[in-house]
Image: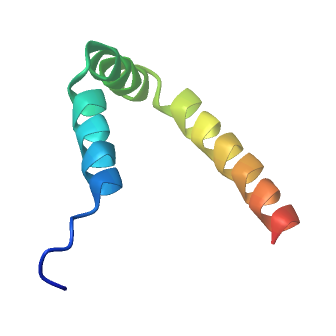
């Protein structure tokens, strides 16, 4: 790295945004709801996960 060159400010902004979003109440509440769904209804959560994975797989396959 050259001396006197400024750092990557975009990476600093992005990392701060990610840290703030992980600490937000909305993210914490959403995580708690997901954990509750997985422990209360494991079959439903498994089916949802498979359906989402299948949908994402077909989208990626069409683009690729």
Q: Residue at x 40, y 25 (%)?
A: 34
Q: Residue at x 75, y 62 (%)?
A: 60
Most distant residue in the right direction: 62
Q: Which quarter of the figure is the C terminus placed in?
A: bottom right
Q: Is residue 32 left or right of residue 57?
A: left
Q: Is residue 42 left or right of residue 15?
A: right
Furthest residue in direction bottom, as rendered: 1
Figure check: 43 above or below 11: above
Q: How many marks?
A: 0
- The image position of residue 30, as x and y in percent, is 38, 20
Rendered position, 11 above or below 25? below
Colour mode?
A: rainbow
Q: Where in the figure is residue 19, as x and y percent of width and height?
A: 22, 37
Quadrant of the frame with the N terminus: bottom left
Q: Residue furthest front?
A: 4
**Res 6 quadrant in image:** bottom left
Residue at image position (73%, 58%) is: 57
Q: Quadrant of residue 35?
A: top left
Give whichever of 19, 2 is nearer the camera. Answer: 2
Q: Position of residue 20 (x, y in %)?
A: 24, 29
**Image side of residue 52 versus residue 26, left or right:** right
- Which residue in the rendered view is the most extreme toward the left? 3
């Amino acid at each position: 790295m050259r001396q006197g060159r400024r750092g990557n400010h975009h990476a600093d902004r992005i990392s701060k945004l990610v840290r703030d979003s992980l600490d937000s109440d909305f993210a914490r509440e959403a995580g708690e709801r997901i954990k509750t769904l997985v422990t209360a209804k494991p079959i439903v959560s498994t089916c949802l996960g498979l359906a989402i994975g299948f949908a994402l797989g077909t989208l990626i396959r069409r683009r690729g």
